[in-house]
Amino acid sequence: MGSELRGFICLWLLLLLLQVSRADKQQTWPVPYRRYDHRPTPDPFCQPKYPFCPTGSPNGEIPQLKDQDHIEVYRLQTPVWKFKFGDLLGHFHIMHDAIGFRSTLTGKNYTMEWYELFQLGNCTFPHLRPGIAAPFWCNQGAACFFEGIDDLHWKENGSLVKVSEVSGEIFNKMAKWVKEDNRTGIYYETWTVQADPNPGSKIWFESYDCSAFVLRTYHALSKLGAVFKSPIQTNYTRIFLYSGEPTYLGNDSSIFGPHGNKTLAEQINSFYLPFRPPHSAKEFIISLLEIVEKVIVQNTFYLYFNYEYWCLPMKQPYIEITYEEIPLPS
């Protein structure tokens, strides 16, 4: 075989492989939430205003119960930041979800929830730190399990409702599932992003928050044999962004690294700048006008998902908070 012919065949095979590679990389929607092989230690810069899981296990560790025990399972829901704002956010249906357990053998109660290590604002928007090119995120979330259920906290403006009963054996299997879920699912995601508000609309990204954890746990229990029934409608808070098809931009190194895209890096940093905490009423108004300009007038939102950046071409109604029913597993 002549060298020219061999060269032509090699070139043809290379082009074929490139076509196959492109086909394999066809984007999946919604973008799957990336799992990791371990939970990294948070950067010391990230400091919580309120300690994470102060009375329980911040690693999602759950004590083993006796297999013959009968465990009551409770749906827990209350307005976000009720300890600080009372029922204020409840009027807007901005709710926090958790799961309660009661051992009938010992009479002990337990609460399990999944939430931000460094508060919601840090999970939703980054810090822009002097001397650091890329936006700096404190966006880890994790499971917290502790003894006791604060009945008044949940009942007063939310709900504390029994939804199932499982054996100690099923509970222990669930505990193993929670530990693995907590080890591999490490970051919080506030937004659900979809094409429009209509039912069946294309979903681009799904949130990964307290309610998502509760729903995952319910489904894990169902697979293990739990049967669910609720005397009330099970609604959950979701915060939507509406956009056309997102465009993948890259990660920290490809955008902000030495050989990154300086123009894009400046655009992303400029976008996040008005989301910083304001120091005065005047600064708040200026920042709000800048956000309106970027999101509504320029129809642009930069989303950080799986430690990568995406550009969302925003469209009406841009953002919406819903409180809709998601049925229990059947």
Image (cartoon, helix red, strand yellow):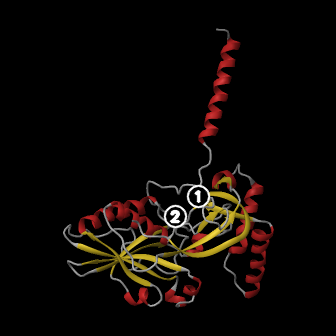
Write down the residue under mark 2.
187
Q: For numbered disc 2, what is the local secondary structure?
A: loop
Report the amino acid beneath label 2.
Tyr
Of 238 and 201, the residue lying toward us: 201
Residue visible at 23% across and 82% down?
Answer: 107
Please identify the quadrant where the N terminus is shown. top right
When asked about the image quadrant of residue 24, the answer is: top right
Any part of residue 52 in sight: no
The span from disc 2 to disc 1 (Cα, nearest Å) is 9 Å
- Residue 201: numbered disc: none
Do residues under tags 2 and 1 come within 8 Å of each other at their CB atoms?
yes
Write down the residue under mark 1.
307
Of 45 and 224, the residue lying toward us: 224
Q: For numbered disc 1, what is the local secondary structure?
A: loop
Any part of residue 5 in sight: yes
Dot 1 surroundings within 10 Å: few (below 14), some, or many (20 or more)? few
Residue visible at 65% across and 68% down?
Answer: 197
Report the amino acid beneath label 1.
Tyr
Which residue of the protein is positioned furthest toward the top in this rendering? 1
Image: 283 above or below 22 = below
Please identify the quadrant where the C terminus is shown. bottom left
The image position of residue 13, as x and y in percent, is 63, 24
When asked about the image quadrant of residue 247, the answer is: bottom right
